[in-house]
Image: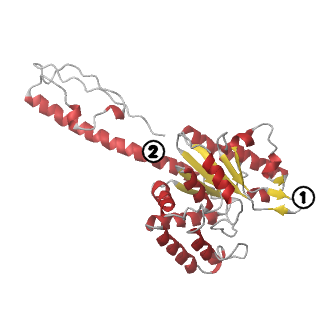
Amino acid sequence: MINPIDQRGVTSIEDSFPVVKAQPVPVPRGLAAFPDTIDQAKAPTELTPCLDSFFQKICDCLISIINTLKRFFCLSRKEEITTVLNSFDNSEINGKINGIYITTNETGLENTYAFLARQPKRDQPTIHIGCAAWYNLDIIYARKSTYGLIVDFNPKNGEFIKKTVDLINSCESREAFKSSMIEYLHSLKGEERGLFFHPDQLGLPTDRIEEELSRKGSWLETEESYQYIKRELVSKNRLIAITEDIRNSEKFSQIRQFLDTNGIAIDTVYESNICNFMYRVTDKDSFVKSLKHLLDSSSIFIHCPKIKRSDDTYILLNQRAVLGEEVLADSYDVSKFFEEVQ
């Protein structure tokens, strides 16, 4: 937390200058009350030219210090949000490494984009929280989120997001970014390469990255969408990636409390098909508890429950988007998190 500055009035100098008395001037409290320029600090006075020069020098010095403190505290505030969110990273999750899915292979994206467009924007800073990789950036751009927090059980996913951030910082255009990312993937060897080039996906990741530049709704579809992610999140250090287990409901409760304290609304939550990997009752209960910690009535929840057809077959990767008020209602059937009947 930022400590307030205790500003005290200037003490009397009557003992040093017994002949001259200055009328006491009340000093406003708070950094914002200080003038930003010397001219604003000047006030009519009957002091001698010597005293006037003396006080002006003091005033110049104080204004310089206060303006520096203003800039410092503003910067510290931004850094504090990022630093605290990064501190939620769970370094104890090691070895739980699966393949990385750079782009999404889920269906129903058009319905989700339409749902996102219909919902009113918040009138406060917002954050998107989601798992997996680049599809989170689609949502962030669609909702113009202030922050993005990507949380995944796979520590390699966090490393990939940080690599993405590095390349965005160094690439001025989406074309340059695409080329740099493809070059990076081709440079990988052995197990590192196997994280991205694996059979459990649709097509080569390099081909899918090429397709992102023309896919409707992708954060790489236009230069405008790429520049929003670059300018408003990456360059401001507002895209954070951590490793954590969605079943750790206490951790997500702490994240929610921190965001509430700092006036940041959780606008969107994307959980992909994590629900398909919850088998035990205790795991499902913890999963539901974590999600309810993250949602408020206006939050948008995007996930992929199993969709059971009438012939007892399942659709596994079809997105559903609902408002938090529906999920948080006492009448909501939480089994819908995991399976819905078509």
- Quadrant (top left/top right/bottom left/bottom right) for the C terminus: bottom right
Number of numbered discs overlaid on the protein picture: 2
Q: Residue at x 76, y 47 (%)?
A: 288
- Determine whether the residue tagged by mark 2 lies in a helix, strand or loop: helix
Residue 312: quadrant of the picture: bottom right
Could you tell me residue 10's position as x and y percent?
A: 25, 27
Q: Around disc 1, counting alpha carbons within 10 Å, would you say few (fewer than 14), some (14 to 19), or many (20 or more)?
A: few
Estimate the spatial distance between the alpha carbons at disc 2 and disc 1, rounded to whole Å. Answer: 54 Å
Could you tell me residue 280's position as x and y percent?
A: 84, 54
Q: Amino acid at mark 1?
A: Ser
Above or below, 15 relative to 330: above
Q: Around disc 2, counting alpha carbons within 10 Å, would you say few (fewer than 14), some (14 to 19), or many (20 or more)?
A: some
Image side of residue 56 versus residue 334, left or right: left
2 or 1: tag closer to the N-terminus:
2
Q: Amino acid at mark 2?
A: Arg
Image coloring type:
secondary structure
Could you tell me residue 271's position as x and y percent?
A: 69, 55
Please tell me whether mark 2 or mark 1 is closer to you in this view. Answer: 1
Q: Residue furthest right?
A: 311
Residue 34: quadrant of the picture: top left
Q: Which residue is mark 2?
A: 77
Image side of residue 22 versus residue 9, left or right: left
Q: Which mark is residue 184?
A: none
Above or below, 143 relative to 332: below
Image side of residue 16 versus residue 94, left or right: left
Q: Residue at x 61, y 50 (%)?
A: 117
Could you tell me residue 85's position as x and y percent?
A: 56, 50
Q: Residue at x 62, y 77 (%)?
A: 193
Q: Which mark is residue 310?
A: 1
Which of the two residues, 193 or 340, is positioned nearer the viewer here? 340
- Determine whether the residue tagged by mark 1 lies in a helix, strand or loop: loop
Which of the two residues, 165 or 321, is positioned nearer the viewer here? 321
